[in-house]
Amino acid sequence: MPLLEIKKMSHDFGGLRAVNGYDLTFEPGQIRGLIGPNGAGKTTIFNLITGIYIPTEGDILLNGKSIVGLKPYQIASMGLGRTFQNLRLWRHMTVLEHVKMARYSKINYGLVGSFFGTPKRNREEAEIDDLARSLLELVGVAHLAEQVIVNLPYGDQRRVEMARALATEPRILFLDEPTAGMNPEELIQMMGIIRRIHNELGLAIFLIEHRLKVVMELCETIQALVFGEVIAEGTSEEIQNDPRVIEAYLGKEKIL
Amino acid sequence: MKATSENSPKSNRSRARAFREYFSGVPLLGWLAGGLVAVLLERFLGTPLAHLLGLPKVPVLFGCVIILKKPLLIPGTVIYLLLVYVLPVGIVARLCGSVINRLVSWLFNLSPTFSVIVHLCLLYGLLSIWSGISAYRLLTLKLTLIAVIVTLSLNIINGYMGEFSCSHPGFMALGAYSASVVTLLLFVDDRVFGAALLPEALGPFMFPVALIGGGIVAAVGAIAIAIPSFRTRGDYLAIISLAFMFIVKSMIENLEIVGGPRGLSSQPNYVNLPTLFLWTVAAVWIINNFVRSVLGKALNAVRDDEMAADAMTVNTRRTKFVAFLFGAFWAGVAGGLLAHVLRYVNPGTFGIQKLAEVLAMVYFGGLNSVYGSIVGAVGYSLLSEALRPLELFKWIIIPLLLILVMIFRPTGLIAFKEFNVMNLIRPKGKPIREESTSKGGVLIRS
Ligand SMILES: Nc1ncnc2c1ncn2[C@@H]1O[C@H](COP(=O)(O)OP(=O)(O)OP(=O)(O)O)[C@@H](O)[C@H]1O
Ligand SMILES: [Mg+2]
């Protein structure tokens, strides 16, 4: 059974059909890419899967069970972690607090523990602390743990967002343009981090990217989306050579 | 504690710095011991010294009241304060610093919990001796402690949760009336509810139950704000909460069974200083525990970016629900305490003026900060007593001050700072620099 299966998913914003008949079969451990020009509906697909929007038509199955209509926090705690295209961070919180917060649904000490500082709470908080620090280590910002997030440079904020998504213990990680706005050096580092996450944690990763170089290098399978419809799906060679992709996305001339 | 500086303009800065360094090795226990010496000194020598300096009596609130009433007495008051408070505290803190430091580290290594208890006992001793001088001091102290609880509880909603809630006087009223009805009905022979139903001696033991009951009633009332908060934020919620406050007030005004607009009086005198001190400590402890846990930090996450919180598995509805009910619970408890300190409540107590005061304390002290709430509540209470002789003008000056604070420090004096008790009671070996500065809205936290 595939990890995530999407059948004929469509979504309308008022009169605008942003996503049309989208299909996806996601196997564990896969690393997939989603490309498409601006406004193609890529972010909308992520928002539909993670429960921010409810699809107008179609079904989303996680391990064979439909997750349509569940709240985003429920879907997230079932193992769909994500980052956002425009960073969504909590501007008054420290880096460490960001990562710890993503453990919310795994906390067992409850309100009583949070009010009275029971031993159970102290133990759990210490465990979460350790876990959060090791995730920060993984993305390379452990030394910034006590900083307030807004004091970090943009590239590091992206890394924190990644660590935060990992702390939810995802089975699939959805990355919405993780290299947007990065300089070439940061870009290389970010690709390294994505590879490391994939290899070390064996996570399935679904990547939206604008820079074709990144998707072509990282992903096994790529979907090309135009006006809410998948026009091509395949390996990076297949996508690069697909005439419809070249026409619709890369322009008349091949630029890669 | 301010420097007793001989003004040499050249090196004022470095002097202040040296002064701070001079005292930075003094642990909290040292300051408390100094304070204890000062209040003992005042207790035994205060009155003769005051007469010697030409003061009619011991300055009750550090001279706050005298400043505006009798300006001619200011020099005498300043000398008095120097002799009784500043010098003894400074001398004890400094001279016994190293001894006390050793004591503190011994205590800390023995058991941090025990150390906290020792600190609290000392603080209580200090407060009780200080307030023993006059009934006015005692009342001010009690009202200040209640203000600390109220401010903290509002900070949960307005600071940590980031909603502008105006319903707090309503929650306080619910708590005050519920607790009063219980104690009046059960333990007192009075004109509204008739003879006591239970033996009077049981009263003080059942009083905590009555207070918690009041808190629960307030929390139930808060559901009326919590549910709309799932869908709306900001202005609309502020209006809903304001409406809630007025509804509670007029509901009580029209309920003849609880005295209508005349209110309830002759509540039993259960709230002595130790009781109130314990309740305040409990409130600070529990609220501080909560806001430092991941479940409490979830309030900040929901405030700063709700969608991100949702995507990071935070149950945002539950979080909002908990924030409103928890805040309202403590407001209710504070209301119950207030009713039994004043031993009289009427609906007018819980109107728009109360709201202004509570908001002022929260925003003056600092959002999202337990320190800030304590400072805000104490500072505002003292200021409000000091300005009392101005009567109506008080209500011009206080808002003006609030506007100034909002302009220069929009989030309040001590905003976004964690209240870490362990750091507070830790021995101070070398002066550790952990200043938290905030520049241009960018926050750097220790
Ligand atoms: N909340 C919304 N309400 C109405 N229309 C929306 C909404 N969100 C997105 N759209 C529209 O849906 C279409 C797809 O948007 P989406 O953000 O998914 O594009 P994208 O592929 O992520 O583009 P980009 O590369 O710019 O991020 C666009 O035409 C956009 O204007
Ligand atoms: Mg997008």
Image: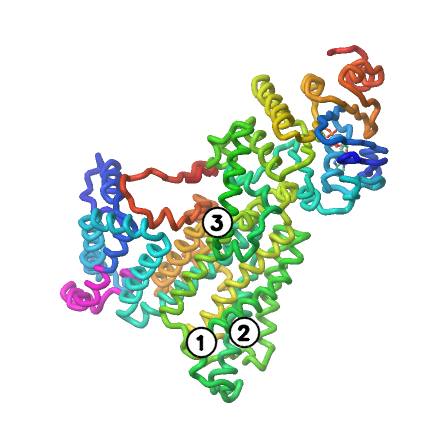
Report x, y in % for residue B371. Answer: 41, 51
The quarter of the displayed image where residue A248 is located = top right
User: In whole angstroms, how far apart are the C-alphas of marks 2 and 3?
Assistant: 35 Å
Q: Mark 3 points at which residue?
A: A122
B223 relative position to A28: left or right: left
A88 relative position to B426: left or right: right
Along the line of sight, which residue is nearer the eye, A18 or B404?
Answer: A18
Q: What stretch is highlighted in magenta?
A: B37-65
Secondary structure under badge 2? helix
Report x, y in % for residue B106. Answer: 28, 50
Q: Are marks 2 and 3 on the same chain?
A: no
Q: Residue at x 33, y 55 (%)?
A: B115
Amino acid type shown at disc 3: Asn
Q: Which residue lies furthest to the bottom in this view?
A: B195
Q: Can residue A93 be seen in this view?
A: no
Q: Which residue is drawn at 79% across and 43% down?
A: A66
Chain at numbered mark 1 = B
Q: How crowded is mark 2: few (under 14 residues within 10 Å), some or many (20 or more)?
A: many
A163 relative position to A213: left or right: left
Q: Can residue B355 be seen in this view?
A: yes
Amino acid type shown at disc 2: Ser
Q: Residues within 10 Å of mark 3 (few under 14, many from 20)?
A: some
Secondary structure under badge 1? helix
Q: Name the residue under label 1.
A: B205
User: In whole angstroms, how far apart are the C-alphas of marks 3 and 1?
Assistant: 32 Å
Q: Name the residue under label 2.
A: B178
Q: Earlier in the sequence, mark 1 or mark 2?
A: 2
In the depicted structure, whether residue B55 falls above or below residue B106: below
